[in-house]
Amino acid sequence: GCSSSEENTETIVPGTNSGFPPFEYTEDGELVGFDIELAETVIDRAGYEVGEWQDIAFESLIPSVLDGDIDLIAAGMTIGPDRQEQIDFTDPYWESSQAVLVQEGGEFQPESVEDLEGVRVGAQGGTTGEGEAEALVEDGLVAEDDLRRYDNYTLAAQDLENGNVDAVIVDEPVAGSFAGDRAVAIAFVIDTGEQFGMGMRPDDERLSDLNDALAELRDDGTYDELVGEWFE
Ligand code: GLN
């Protein structure tokens, strides 16, 4: 038959949060990026249909996958214990640390977290970068009011360019992308050694098929091709 529940097991609806180049961003109104292409290639290789992408707030991604509004999170999401209590992750597909971005050529050129004392620090809400910024508040280096939380990292980078915030803590490859396009530069890196995975409901048995497909793409060179396409 063709009951909708059977159809649902064939289609994987992916969700992301754009504004995170080169992993996911919009170009001429279209959602593009490494995560977009990798997720579509993995879903396809695993033998499933790619559903319609949902571009939603980063903090809504886990609730949305748990509610079944989406089936897969592809959003540069770091695999971590708090998140693993709620969702399952694919095998890691990327490694990253956090970079501290400042205005390019500006007077403020911090070299370590201690140098962030007394400044305004920005991050996207619900991210590991926000966690690093919160640690600065807990350590008494940054005032609670000076922690700026943004809906997406592109807004944070814009505010940094405009001088409304002094430093932005963001995943290193994304910081590199902003530094290539905007008057911002990486001041230093916080070595967090994070790994990105794609997220699914814990009871979704399709996860192992996606892991098999991911391993295949690594073996046959497709993964490297995609990296070459989206990262200089
Ligand atoms: N890797 C970071 C995290 O998982 C940021 C992800 C993002 O902003 N899309 O929290």
Image (tube, rainbow, N blue to C red):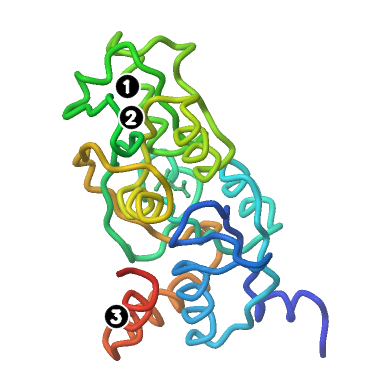
Q: Earlier in the sequence, mark 1 or mark 3?
A: 1
Residue at 39 percent across and 33 percent down: it is 168
Question: Is 70 positioned to the left or the right of 142 in the image?
Answer: right
CB under 8 Å between callouts 1 and 3? no
Distance of mark 2 from mark 3, alpha carbons? 30 Å
* Rendered image: mark on residue 224: 3
Which quadrant of the rendered structure holds the C terminus? bottom left
Callout 2: 10 Å neighbours few (<14), some, many (20+)?
some
The three-letter code of the residue at mark 1 reads: Ala
The three-letter code of the residue at mark 3 reads: Asp
Q: 1 or 8, which is in the foreground?
A: 8
142 versus 221 height, above or below: above
Residue at 47 percent across and 40 percent down: it is 157
Under circle 1, the secondary element is: helix
Q: 96 or 106, which is in the foreground?
A: 106
* Rendered image: mark on residue 135: 1
Q: Earlier in the sequence, mark 2 or mark 3?
A: 2
The image position of residue 9, as x and y in percent, is: 66, 76
Among the 4 quarters of the image, the one containing residue 140: top left
The residue identified by callout 2 is 132
The image position of residue 1, as x and y in percent, is: 82, 90
The image position of residue 136, as x and y in percent, is: 31, 19
Distance of mark 1 from mark 3, alpha carbons? 35 Å
The three-letter code of the residue at mark 2 reads: Glu
Q: 163 or 51, which is in the foreground?
A: 163
Residue at 33 percent across and 55 percent down: it is 173
CB under 8 Å between callouts 2 and 1? yes
